[in-house]
Amino acid sequence: MAERMLTSGAVSLCVQTFGSAADPAVLLIAGGAQSMVWWEDAFCRRLAAGGRLVVRYDHRDTGRSTASPPGRPDYTASDLAGDPLRILDALGVDAAHVVGLSLGGGLAQALAAGSPGRLRTLTLVATSPAGPYDGVALPGPTTPLVRWLSDPPPAPDWSDRAAVLAYRVDAERPYAGALGFDEARVRRLAVAEIDRTTDMAAAMGNHVLAAGDAWPDGRAMEDIRCPTLVLHGTADPLFPLAHGRALARSIPGARLLALDGVGHQQPPPQRWDVVVPALLAHTDR
């Protein structure tokens, strides 16, 4: 694994790579309020072992990347959507296989519609159509998640590491699927995230404030033409499986792979034996 800071103007993005630079690049885009650590080291190494240069990075306000003051992000959703291109430019990669989860999936869709020449393939994980599509109404979050979102736990004392850790772990709990909540694994990843994050208050709150429409004007979902794989958990409480079906229906030639029991999350280790071969096959182009 190699790590470097890439600077573009006033923005610095922390990037890590696994594998050989001679191999095709697979760029992993995390979800909102997530640093790169949620794409686990072991997952990245398994992809790299299949002959891929795996690239993961910290979004702005997460990990070691540029941080804004809490509650005052100095960027927009369009800026977040442009960061993958900044990373590819800095790495000298003309076109990459792009994998986006949740918010990252929305950013990946915007890239595929607006900068199609930069994507070899697109993989969308636990996300929903980001642009105009056939208009079929999609189901909202599950009732338990709605209850949690309407009355979330109060923010911790950000100077109290133990309180911040408990808060970060609990933030993932309601998104678990039918496989159950792996608290030990989530705690391990949360510790890694906290130990390398400039400002956890900014990391946990600023993406929501910066959220907006990064979708390119005049484009529709059907304008996404690169080969697309949709990975969607059957137990996703935020975007039920109908959202994954809508993506596969709206993007020409897209294929849906339903992940049994998976919630709104990176594919957990229990499903890597399905997900990793599927990604390697999809990116073998």
Image (spheres, rainbow, N blue to C red):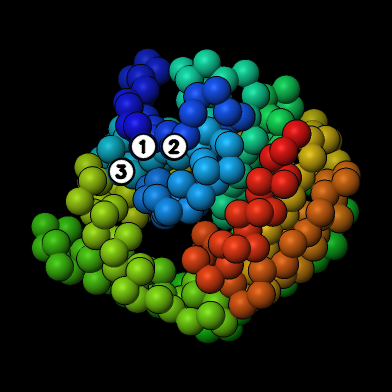
Q: CA distance from mark 3 to mark 2?
A: 18 Å
Most foreground residue, 143 or 174: 174
Q: Is residue 213 above or below residue 264?
A: above
**Residue reaching furthest to the left:** 159
- Per the model, the C-alpha gap separating discs 3 and 1 is 16 Å
Q: Which residue is mark 1?
A: 1
Q: Tell me the amino acid under the disc marked 1.
A: Met
The mark that comes first in sequence, 3 or 1, is 1
Does 34 appear above or below 24?
Answer: below
Pointer 3: residues within 10 angstroms few (<14), some, or many (20+)?
A: many
Dot 1, how many residues are within 10 Å of its Cα: few (below 14), some (14-19), or many (20+)?
Answer: few
Question: Image point 24% across, 71% down: which residue?
Answer: 166
Q: Is residue 163 left or right of residue 274?
A: left
Comparing labels 3 and 2, the label whose residue is closer to the camera: 2
Pointer 3: what residue?
Answer: 63
Nearer the observer, 30 or 121: 121
